[in-house]
Amino acid sequence: MTILTNVQEELEKDIKKLVGELKSDEQLTEILKRKLTKKEFKYYKMKLEKVEEAEIKTELHADDERFEEIKKQTILKLNQEKLKKELIS
């Protein structure tokens, strides 16, 4: 299992209101893998790796509309209180 780097950094940008310290990148990766759908996790992982949107769309087999939906859904999930509580140590 590859541990994603900069997970904390990226989550801090994507989560609107964060109270407390985020867990380690390793723990965060595990939580995200459990809580997001496969496509959402793959999208977020590629986003962290700074992959271009066009390549992410190809990898996810998503057209523009579907890609935007995955993106929006992922950010919405990250901002749910229940998930935010889990991400904080």
Image: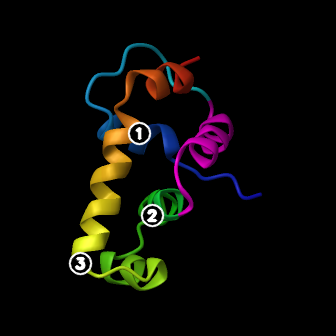
Query: Is 53 left, or right, of 23 in this rendering?
Result: left
- 1, 50: nearer the viewer: 1
Q: For residue 27: magenta?
A: yes
* Amino acid, disc 2: Tyr
Q: Is disc 1 placed on a helix, strand or loop? A: helix
Q: Which mark is residue 46?
A: none
Circle 3 is placed at which residue position? Answer: 64
Compute the Cα span from label 3 to label 2.
13 Å
Q: Position of residue 24 (x, y in %)?
A: 63, 32
Task: Report if residue 31 lies within the magenta region.
Answer: yes
Which quarter of the figure is the C terminus placed in? top right
Give how far across and how far down residue 45 sits, in percent.
52, 60
In the image, what residue occupies the spot 29% across and 82% down?
63
Relative to residue 29, is residue 83 depicted above or below?
Answer: above
Residue 66 occupies quadrant: bottom left
Q: Which residue in the structure is indicated by mark 2?
A: 43
Q: Residues within 10 Å of mark 2 (few under 14, many from 20)?
A: many
Tell me the amino acid under the disc marked 1.
Leu
Q: Is residue 49 above or below residue 11?
A: below
The residue range painted magenta reads 24-38
